[in-house]
Image (cartoon, grey):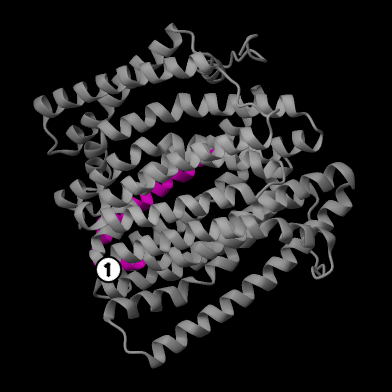
């Protein structure tokens, strides 16, 4: 498991850099536009190219493409592997350009011939500028998948920093000079999204060239790899489309109820994505090519062991982090966002959403890992079916909860359905492949749960004392009310798991201190 930890750890460092910059970007957003209606409209418009990006790029396409790319590498050699990659890129460019052309035409006709409210007109004008981002970032997603399959994780994960750097520069230096009102200044961010898309794709090219990749047009229409990939993509595309359409529908409902809900919920989601991306997504990204290789070689015992150990590491890290986000939601949101247009009332709204999202952190990450196990086995249908069912439930819960609880209702719906999704994927995996057992340190997981309760209780008590003694008026006081309880609770949690000899704790600490012992103790 040394390689799993080192590769996902390197990616975690890169993802941490990206997510920290992403958090700085969100802080800039909060100061610039708060959780106003304009903020909600901009974030809603940006969701739409993200829908198609995840539909064609990062989601179903990557899940179908990486195992095929890895299989070509093992069975046909590098020449065939790169030709297959070029055929896939050629196909993606054709499809993405067609989608962009149709969507821009529909938006232009709607703006010219329909009577729209000012909010809807602003949303469509922003969307018309940003939608080509989908093409750029889809290409970047394929580049990242190729590098992951070739064993590169750090550089691809760092590519996401390009979006954050460009957007931060745009918010701080370009948007304030773009016009007199927020409704005009927001267009600077729309153009910055396109610049970021170019930067994300270009960032991957130097490493790809070192690996031997050279792009040349390969007709995709009769290419075997493209045919198989599209066939495998269809179920996964339905699942990813269901996720994104659900996200779009729930945010449409939120926009209709109260425009500020979209923005405040988005800030809470970004805080959740920081720990989820640093380890959960990093680990899942490493697992797909690793598990695909083991499945191709029929090494199911190692497949099971790798999957079980991944769950151990995920549970050890994200369960405690989720507990910290729950008990420290208010001081964290206050420290990061409360300035400029983001006032105390906005802090309360975003903190409440974060408290309702935090209990689902382990489930959000586990869904990614279990889905990767199915993808590695060449099964994209089962995750799709489970995902669609859970998303229908999520939409029903949002409809029921959003009016009485607003952003908290959206968050609760997400936590409930993600937990159910993870459980159903786990059950389906056991049913599909009885020989694939999610083994691991069962005793350790129970101890991690107990230690999490202890560490979170310490963090909550220390926070209450800091608030009583220091207050939260100044920046120094706000930093203290976050980091003193965070480090106190973290120290207690780590000490307790090491004292109780939790395997995941020993291995992760050993890796961090450079004394990682290869392999795991017998019986784990």
Give SS at disc 1. helix
In this picture, which residue range is highlighted in magenta? 14-42
User: In the rendered image, which quarter contains the N terminus?
Assistant: top right
Q: Is residue 219 above or below residue 209?
A: below
Query: Is residue 309 something one can see in this rendering?
Result: yes
State the image coordinates of residue 324 (x, y, percent, origin top left): 32, 30
Closest to the observer, 195 or 413: 413
Q: Is residue 140 above or below residue 72?
A: below
- Specify whether residue 60 is painted magenta: no
Examine the image and state in which quarter residue 83 appears.
bottom right
State the image coordinates of residue 135 (x, y, percent, origin top left): 59, 68
Examine the image and state in which quarter residue 433 appears.
top right
State the image coordinates of residue 284 (x, y, percent, origin top left): 58, 38
**Residue located at (60% from left, 15% from top):** 516
Q: Which residue is mark 1?
A: 256
Q: Main secondary structure of the magenta part?
A: helix
Q: Residues within 10 Å of mark 1 (few under 14, many from 20)?
A: few
User: In the rendered image, which quarter contains the C terminus?
Assistant: top right
Query: Is residue 16 something one can see in this rendering?
Result: no
**Residue located at (36% from left, 33% from top):** 322
Q: In the figure, is residue 312 to the left or right of 153?
A: left
Q: Is residue 100 above or below residue 394?
A: below
**Residue located at (29% from left, 19% from top):** 488
Q: In the figure, is residue 281 to the left or right of 405?
A: right
- Specify whether residue 29 is painted magenta: yes
Closest to the observer, 290 or 242: 242
State the image coordinates of residue 446 (x, y, percent, origin top left): 44, 17
Query: How many marks on residues?
Result: 1
Examine the image and state in which quarter residue 471 appears.
top left
Q: Is residue 515 above or below residue 376?
A: above
- Extreme residue in the front direction: 431
């Amino acid at each position: 498991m040394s390689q799993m930890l080192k590769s996902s750890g390197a990616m975690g460092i890169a993802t941490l850099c990206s997510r920290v910059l992403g958090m700085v970007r969100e802080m800039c957003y909060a100061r610039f536009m708060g959780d106003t209606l304009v903020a909600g409209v901009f974030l809603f418009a940006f969701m739409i190219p993200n829908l198609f990006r995840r539909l064609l790029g990062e989601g179903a396409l990557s899940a179908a493409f990486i195992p095929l790319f890895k299989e070509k590498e093992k069975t046909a050699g590098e020449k065939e592997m790169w030709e297959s990659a070029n055929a896939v890129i050629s196909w993606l460019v054709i499809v993405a350009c067609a989608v962009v052309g149709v969507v821009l035409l529909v938006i232009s006709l709607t703006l010219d011939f329909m009577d729209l409210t000012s909010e809807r007109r602003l949303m469509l004008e922003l969307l018309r500028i940003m939608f080509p981002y989908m093409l750029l970032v889809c290409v970047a997603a394929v580049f990242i998948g190729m590098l992951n399959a070739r064993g590169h994780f750090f550089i691809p994960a760092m590519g996401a920093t390009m979006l954050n750097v460009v957007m931060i520069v745009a918010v701080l230096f370009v948007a304030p000079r773009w016009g007199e009102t927020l409704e005009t200044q927001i267009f600077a961010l729309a153009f910055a999204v396109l610049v970021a898309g170019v930067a994300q794709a270009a960032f991957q090219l130097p490493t790809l060239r070192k690996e031997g990749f050279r792009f040349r047009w390969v007709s995709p229409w009769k290419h075997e790899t493209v045919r198989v990939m599209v066939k495998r993509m269809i179920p996964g595309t339905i699942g990813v489309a269901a996720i994104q359409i659900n996200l779009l529908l729930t945010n449409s409902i939120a926009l209709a109820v109260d425009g500020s809900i979209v923005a405040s919920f988005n800030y809470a989601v970004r805080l959740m994505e920081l720990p989820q991306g640093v380890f959960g997504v990093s680990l899942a990204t490493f697992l797909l090519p690793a598990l695909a290789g083991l499945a191709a070689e029929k090494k199911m015992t190692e497949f099971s062991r790798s999957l079980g150990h991944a769950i151990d590491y995920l549970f050890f890290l994200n369960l405690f982090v989720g507990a910290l986000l729950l008990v420290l939601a208010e001081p964290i949101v206050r420290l990061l966002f409360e300035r400029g247009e983001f006032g105390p009332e906005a802090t309360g709204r975003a903190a409440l959403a974060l408290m309702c999202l935090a209990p689902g952190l382990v489930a959000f990450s586990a869904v990614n890992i279990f889905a990767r196990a199915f993808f590695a086995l060449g099964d994209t249908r089962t995750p799709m079916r489970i995902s669609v069912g859970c998303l229908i439930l999520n939409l029903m819960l949002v409809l029921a909860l959003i009016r009485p609880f607003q952003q908290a209702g959206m968050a609760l719906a997400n936590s409930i359905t993600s937990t159910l999704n993870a459980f159903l994927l786990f059950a389906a995996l056991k049913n599909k492949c009885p020989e694939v057992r999610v083994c691991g340190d069962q005793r350790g997981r129970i101890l991690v749960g107990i230690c999490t309760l202890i560490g979170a209780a310490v963090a909550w008590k220390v926070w209450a004392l800091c608030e009583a003694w220091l207050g939260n008026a100044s920046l120094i006081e706000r930093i203290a009310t976050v980091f003193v309880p965070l480090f106190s609770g973290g120290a207690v949690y780590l000490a307790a798991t090491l004292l109780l000899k939790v395997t995941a704790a020993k291995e992760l600490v050993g890796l961090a201190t450079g004394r990682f012992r290869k392999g795991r103790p017998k019986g784990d």
